[in-house]
């Protein structure tokens, strides 16, 4: 991981992995992975890496290409160009070591949770020996004899994840595992996924539930319109913060800040300057304002939620990405394309 230098005059940015830089101990590597349906490019030259033992979030608005990418990693969809390597082998060749919940696992409502897993285990040729162990892992041992149809949504989802664990996989791939769950269900799935990572498994999940990913994932890739916007740790992504400055005269302060940072990183909100900066830029901003005879009465760095960062990166929708704005240009994948 390379950290973006914190120099004034350059946009603040998270510290994404530079494209083409190999990640340590990679479990998944994609290299300009591309999928086109007809003339439509739904995954566009995606290059990213997932490290062993991490929970990796694949984030993006509806239609961003997340499911298609996961399906390519599983060998269910053939890439148009580029490549994906999973556990050291071409995508699809490592299927025995990958547990996935990308489409519903096809569970029978009239069978118990345990019997459903037995059927799936036999179908997958992995034997039924692990059925009780995975029921334990997903905290369903005491409801395993109940019919699947009587389960809550959260329990159904956990049974689906149990099914993905039957192979004792090194890598678990889950498409929107918390989709449709209430806060309690989300919390249960979140705890479960953290436990899986604690067991040394690698977890790749897709989501648009940013609040959840924020507390669950070690690293995230943000995609929109099939393109990778940024790949970063959650902490680094949040580090794209905002500096709020109380200064008089305000118009002089704004002019100084615009000269220093560029106009796109400066706005005036409720009588205060809002600057897109990293924490390392605060002192330089203060110095420039004081040198211009501006009275600075307040300077505070506000952390942003991942949601705010996400909305800024994706412009709040799944439409085609505009030209990169300075705040997201530095070292994001989009800026480098
Ligand atoms: N088999 C297909 N044929 C044609 N277009 C497809 C096919 N599969 C997916 N697409 C299109 O590719 C785009 C990306 O879809 P995908 O399901 O990968 O996105 P996503 O990020 O998972 O979205 P969501 O969060 O809504 O599930 C969509 O516009 C979708 O309509």
Image: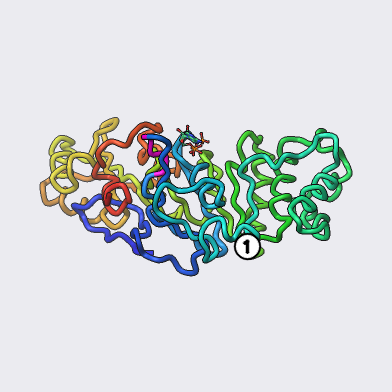
Please state if 252 lies on the left or on the right of 208 as rendered. left
Residue 87 placement: quadrant = bottom right
Q: Position of residue 288 (x, y in %)?
A: 15, 51
Which colour style is shown?
rainbow
Could you tell whether 126 is left or right of 233 in the image?
A: right
Tell which of 224 and 98 is nearer to you: 98
What residue sits right under mark 1 in the picture?
Answer: 170
Closer-to-camera residue (77/290): 77
Residue 140, position as x, y percentages in the image: 80, 48
Residue 256 location (% of width, % of height)? 14, 44
Residue at the extreme right of the image, as rendered: 145
Magenta segment includes 40: yes
Image coords of residue 241 (percent x, y): 35, 47
| Residue drawn at 73 percent across, 49 percent down | 163
Q: Can residue 310 be seen here?
A: no
Q: Nearer the viewer, residue 210 or 124?
A: 124
Residue 128 visible to the viewer: yes
- Residue found farthest to the left: 292
Nearest the camera: 60 or 8? 60
Q: Image point 63% across, 62% down: which residue?
A: 170
Q: Quadrant of residue 147?
A: top right
Looking at the image, residue 162 sits to the left or right of residue 309; the answer is right
The segment highlighted magenta reads: 39-43
Q: Looking at the picture, does residue 264 appear above or below residue 221?
A: above
The structure residue drawn at horizontal position 27% and vertical position 43%, both measured from the top left corner, is 275
Picture layout, residue 304 above or below residue 200: above
Was residue 114 drawn as part of the magenta stretch in this picture? Answer: no
Q: Secondary structure at mark 1?
A: loop
């Amino acid at each position: 991981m390379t950290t973006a230098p914190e120099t004034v005059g350059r946009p603040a940015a998270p510290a994404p992995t530079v494209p083409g830089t190999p990640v340590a101990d990679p479990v998944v590597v994609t290299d300009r992975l591309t999928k086109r349906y007809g003339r439509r490019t739904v995954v566009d030259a995606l290059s990213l890496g997932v490290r062993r033992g991490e929970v990796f979030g694949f984030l993006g608005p509806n239609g961003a290409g997340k499911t298609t990418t996961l399906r390519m990693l599983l060998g269910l969809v053939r890439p148009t160009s580029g490549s994906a390597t999973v556990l050291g082998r071409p995508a699809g060749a490592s299927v025995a070591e990958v547990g996935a919940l990308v489409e519903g696992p096809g569970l029978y409502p009239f069978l118990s949770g345990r019997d459903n897993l037995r059927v799936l285990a036999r179908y997958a040729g992995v034997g039924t020996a692990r059925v009780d162990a995975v029921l334990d892992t997903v905290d369903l041992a005491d409801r395993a004899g109940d019919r699947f149809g009587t389960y809550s949504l959260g329990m159904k989802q956990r049974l689906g994840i149990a099914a993905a664990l039957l192979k004792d996989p090194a890598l678990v791939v889950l498409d929107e595992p918390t989709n449709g769950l209430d806060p309690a269900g989300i919390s249960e799935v979140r705890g479960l996924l953290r436990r899986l990572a604690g067991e040394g498994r690698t977890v790749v999940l897709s989501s648009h539930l940013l609040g959840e990913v924020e507390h669950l994932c070690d690293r995230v890739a943000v995609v929109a319109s099939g393109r990778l916007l940024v790949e970063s740790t959650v902490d680094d992504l949040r580090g794209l913060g905002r500096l709020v400055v109380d200064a008089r005269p305000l118009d002089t302060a704004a002019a100084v800040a615009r000269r220093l940072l560029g106009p796109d990183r400066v706005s005036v909100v409720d009588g205060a300057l809002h600057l897109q900066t990293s924490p390392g830029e605060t002192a330089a901003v203060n110095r420039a304002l004081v040198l211009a005879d501006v009275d600075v009465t307040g300077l505070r760095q506000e952390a942003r939620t991942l949601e705010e960062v996400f909305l800024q990166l994706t412009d709040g929708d799944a439409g085609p990405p505009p030209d990169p704005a300075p705040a997201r240009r530095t070292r994001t994948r989009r800026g480098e394309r």
